[in-house]
Image (cartoon, helix red, strand yellow):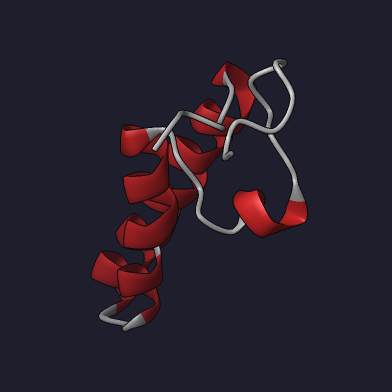
Amino acid sequence: MKPNIGTIDRTLRFIVGASLIAYGVINHSWIGAIGVIPLLTAVIRFCPLYCPLGISTTGGGNKCG
């Protein structure tokens, strides 16, 4: 798995993931569990959905193949 998530994308994923988790905790909602996905992809710097779509936000082109 080569990184395909750039710095800005990674920062946004951290913010969205943490916000969703906080919302879920505050409101006792299952929606907070969805926040784990963007948070996890930000930590590992790899988004599996980007590969088949040929997207890479690292600036080096598609890094999946």
**Left or right position of 54 against 49:** right
User: Residue visible at 32% across and 76% down?
Assistant: 27
User: Residue visible at 30% across and 72% down?
Assistant: 33
- Quadrant of the rendered image containing residue 58: top right
**Left or right position of 44 against 8:** left
Query: Foreground: 54 or 13?
Result: 54
- Quadrant of the rendered image containing residue 9: top right
Q: Quadrant of the N terminus?
A: top left
- Quadrant of the rendered image containing residue 64: top right
Q: Quadrant of the C terminus?
A: top right
Measured along the vertical axis of the image, is residue 4 above or below residue 49? above
Measured along the vertical axis of the image, is residue 29 above or below residue 43? below
Measured along the vertical axis of the image, is residue 13 above or below residue 10? below
Residue 7 image position (x, y, % from top left): 56, 18
Residue 34 image position (x, y, % from top left): 40, 70
Query: Foreground: 54 or 18?
Result: 54
**Left or right position of 5 against 46:** right
Residue 44 image position (x, y, % from top left): 33, 36
User: Residue visible at 34% across and 70% down?
Assistant: 32
Instruction: Find the residue positioned furthest to the front.
Output: 65
User: Residue visible at 51% across and 27% down?
Assistant: 11
Query: Foreground: 55 or 20?
Result: 55
**How many badges with numbers are in the image?**
0
Measured along the vertical axis of the image, is residue 10 above or below residue 55? above
